[in-house]
């Protein structure tokens, strides 16, 4: 339904501190529902224009390569104007000016004549403000808001948009990171499929065994072996051998001086005088049985990947030029198989890393509890790096202390505080440098004792950077063995630490908003019922999820002379926005309820007029407001789209409710009042729709099931009745609530 009365967009309300907080919370709650970059842009712009009562706005993103602003989202802007403003250079228009100054630019009347000419020509409006979106003094984009020439951005509105721009910078950075990770993941998958297509379906070592056997047949020798070469460690590792190993311990050995020279030069050598080989040159065959041997490097793209050995036991076999040529042909195929396998393994690692980082980004976007988030990241990091242990520390730079947020073992209490110094360990936090070390002497005592107990020989300390600030560190290590961290592993650890830092900052921000909202909600949900002769009360509130504790359900009691006012309401939505609206409705109801000769219908009508002017078009509140005459037990009530009250007595039934629109839909709604008599020893039950909409699969708990459960209750304690019903609902929904539930029972003795 369309609202009647004055249009809130034509006369914006002045910003108070409470409205400012509610506006900020509402906008960021809406933006936070999206992780796709385009959705973040569109939602931010739409919500900001709505908050300021404006019809038009643009959001530009700064393209560093082109050194210009590019239009990414718009609302209510003329198409001809858009053609002129798809891109903006430095200093061009209000947005280009904000790009240069890195400050909110609100043009004066004089500046408007020159700078906002296009806006006036095409839209009949002016630029009210251009707001740069900054991250570490770097411009990510610019928000541009348009309005009538007579409209000006107030100082309070200017402060608010600056705060919002900072929050948007975080949201845009998170969405950009998610987009880049997803893009990298898709590219890695494509590369992996291409590599798998060009790789033989046989297992890698099966291919090498086949090639070794083929080399034996073509060169007329009975003994062959293939070894892989590690250019970093200068070791060779046997991949295929037909004989018992003699000089190779665990199939791996350093290449001796003679073999090393062959591998570096990359030329085939036929050895007939074994004295050329030193004792340090490993031989995959029994040396006493070797009279001559052909050593063929496995070359690919100018690099030596391994070596092919051929010989005839106890025979001085003279290798012909043709046999050498055939052996080198086999060697090329073997080198190709090795390279394909290494490429495949590298792409598989890259895919696993990309999926891991994407998983980390999703954790940050979906987990708002800081302890749970850090524990999840601490569990993910070792899986990606290939270690067995991890620890996460948080850093407080004002006190130069660390907090052990995720301890290495249970013997260290969580959140243990340790002082750090200007040593190797402290350098990680003071200078923000990644360190791989086996020296544990500078570690805080609890960490040092724990790691020495677990025989940790090498540790990777990775700072958690958020911009220029170090907010903590990720520690990785192996228990009971030394882990030599590669540059690739260090880079991956730094990427994980970066995500952990974003998670810490986001979680801190969420915790603060949640604390404010919980305080607000607790202020309007009663903790103790009134003490009224002849009446007893029971009530409870259950949130939809553990990490979204606050919601829009509310209820309260009002003692008015010899009457009791009682109401139950439900604001659409969840979170701090719904909580703020519930607080506003509650205070409005209370103000009108104590007016002389007020009635339920007059209170609801007056409340609706106030509420309609304060909330947005898509918001509404269902409400059941009633007054109980204590002497006559007459209950007069008004229901605005709320579920019907339940009267529990010998003939348990739902009270009749007239279908009426919720509060906030239409300012002039003519609500009607109803009356019911509450028998002695009866219960009046009020509840929100979260109770009857609790689900198991495709089934709802529903009104009929509520009626049956109420009839099954035996007792006279209203709190026992509330607990009985909530237990049935939780059992039915398998303890997974889709919406908040508020429940209130009054026992009329």
Image (spheres, rainbow, N blue to C red):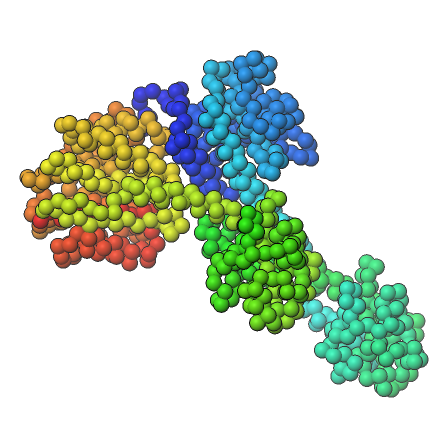
Question: Where residue 20 appears, x then y in whole percent?
Answer: 42, 31
Residue 346 place in picture, x, y as percent = 68, 59
Which one is in front, 50 or 368?
368
Q: Residue at x 19, y 55 (%)?
A: 720
Expressed as whole percent of the image width and height from the top left, the position of residue 716 reads 13, 54
Circle count: 0
Q: Is residue 687 visible?
A: yes
Residue 121 seen: no
Q: Quadrant of the N terminus?
A: top left
Q: Is residue 149 above or below residue 305?
A: above
> Residue placed at 64% from the left, 54% from the top?
422
Question: Where, by quadrant of the figure, is residue 696 drawn?
Answer: bottom left
Residue positioned 30% across, 29% down in the render: 611
Image point (84%, 59%), residue name: 302
Q: Nearer the viewer, residue 289 or 459?
A: 459
Can you say whether 201 is above or below 736 in the image? below
Q: Is residue 718 left or right of residue 76?
A: left
Query: Quick one: 491 or 468, which is closer to the camera?
Result: 468
Left or right of 616: which side holds 322?
Answer: right
Eyeballing the image, is 484 above or below 175? below
Q: Answer above or below: position of 441 versus 674.
A: below
Instruction: Give the side of residue 637 with respect to residue 457, left or right.
Output: left
Residue 278 falls left or right of residue 363: right
| Residue 588 in the image, given as x and y percentages of width and height | 26, 31
């Amino acid at each position: 339904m369309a609202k009647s009365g004055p249009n809130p967009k034509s006369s914006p309300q002045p910003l108070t501190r409470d409205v400012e907080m509610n506006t900020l919370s509402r906008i960021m709650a809406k933006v936070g529902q999206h992780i796709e970059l385009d959705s973040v842009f569109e939602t931010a712009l739409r919500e900001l224009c709505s908050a300021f009562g404006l019809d038009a706005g643009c959001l530009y993103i700064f393209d560093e390569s082109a050194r210009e602003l590019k239009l990414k989202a718009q609302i209510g802007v003329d198409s001809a104007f858009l053609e002129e403003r798809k891109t903006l250079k430095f200093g061009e228009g209000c947005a280009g000016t904000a790009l240069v100054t890195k400050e909110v630019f609100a043009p004066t009347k004089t500046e408007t004549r020159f700078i906002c000419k296009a806006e006036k020509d095409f839209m009949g409006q002016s630029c009210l403000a251009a707001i740069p979106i900054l991250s570490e003094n770097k411009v990510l984009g610019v928000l541009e808001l348009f309005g009538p020439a007579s409209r000006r951005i107030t100082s309070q509105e200017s402060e608010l948009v600056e705060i919002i721009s900072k929050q948007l910078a975080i949201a845009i950075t998170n969405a950009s990171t998610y987009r880049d990770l997803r893009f990298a993941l898709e590219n890695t998958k494509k590369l992996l499929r291409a590599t798998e297509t060009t790789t033989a379906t046989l297992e890698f070592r099966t291919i090498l065994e086949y090639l070794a056997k083929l080399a034996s047949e073509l060169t007329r020798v009975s003994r062959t072996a293939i070894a892989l070469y590690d250019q970093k460690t200068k070791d060779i590792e046997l991949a295929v051998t037909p004989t018992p190993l003699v000089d190779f311990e665990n199939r791996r050995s350093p290449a001796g001086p003679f073999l090393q020279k062959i591998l570096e030069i990359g030329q085939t050598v036929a050895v007939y005088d074994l004295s050329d080989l030193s004792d340090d040159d490993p031989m995959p065959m029994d040396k006493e049985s070797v009279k001559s041997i052909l050593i063929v490097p496995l070359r690919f793209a100018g690099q030596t990947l391994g070596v092919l050995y051929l010989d005839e036991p106890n025979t001085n076999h003279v290798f012909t030029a043709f046999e050498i040529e055939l052996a080198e042909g086999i060697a090329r195929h073997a080198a190709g198989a090795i390279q394909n396998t290494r490429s495949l393994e590298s792409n598989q690692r890259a895919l696993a890393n990309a999926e891991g980082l994407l998983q980390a980004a999703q954790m940050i976007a979906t987990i708002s509890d800081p302890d749970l988030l850090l524990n999840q990241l601490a569990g993910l990091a070792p899986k990606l790096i290939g270690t067995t242990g991890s620890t996460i520390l948080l850093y407080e730079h004002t006190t130069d202390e660390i907090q052990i947020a995720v301890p290495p073992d249970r013997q260290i209490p969580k959140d243990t505080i340790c002082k750090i110094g200007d040593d190797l360990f402290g350098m990680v936090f003071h200078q923000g440098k990644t360190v791989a070390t086996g020296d544990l002497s500078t570690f805080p005592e609890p960490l040092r004792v724990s790691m020495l107990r677990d025989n940790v020989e090498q540790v990777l300390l990775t700072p958690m950077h958020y911009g220029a600030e170090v907010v903590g560190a990720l520690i990785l290590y192996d228990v009971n063995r030394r882990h030599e961290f590669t540059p690739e592993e260090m880079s991956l650890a730094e990427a994980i630490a970066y995500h952990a830092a974003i998670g810490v900052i986001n979680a801190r921000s969420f915790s603060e908003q949640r604390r404010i909202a919980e305080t607000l909600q607790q202020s309007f949900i009663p903790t103790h019922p009134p003490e009224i002769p002849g009446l007893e009360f029971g009530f409870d509130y259950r949130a939809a999820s553990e990490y979204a504790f606050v919601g829009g359900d509310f209820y309260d009691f009002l003692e008015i002379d010899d009457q009791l006012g009682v109401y139950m309401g439900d604001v659409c939505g969840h979170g701090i926005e719904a909580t703020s609206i519930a607080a506003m409705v509650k205070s409005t109801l209370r103000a009108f309820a104590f007016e002389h000769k007020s009635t339920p219908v007059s209170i609801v009508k007056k409340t609706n007029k106030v509420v309609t002017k304060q909330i947005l078009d898509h918001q509404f509140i269902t409400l059941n407001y009633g007054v109980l005459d204590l002497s006559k037990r007459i209950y007069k009530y008004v229901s605005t789209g709320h579920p019907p009250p339940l009267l529990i007595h010998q003939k348990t039934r739902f009270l009749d409710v007239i279908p009426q629109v919720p509060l906030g839909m239409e300012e002039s709604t003519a609500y009607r009042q109803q009356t019911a008599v509450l028998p002695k020893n009866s219960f009046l039950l009020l509840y929100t729709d979260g109770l009857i909409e609790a689900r198991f699969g495709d089934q709802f708990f529903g009104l009929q099931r509520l009626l049956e459960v109420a009839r099954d209750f035996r007792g006279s304690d209203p709190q026992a009745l509330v607990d009985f019903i909530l237990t049935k609902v939780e059992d039915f929904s398998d303890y997974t609530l889709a919406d908040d539930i508020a429940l209130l029972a009054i026992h009329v003795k």
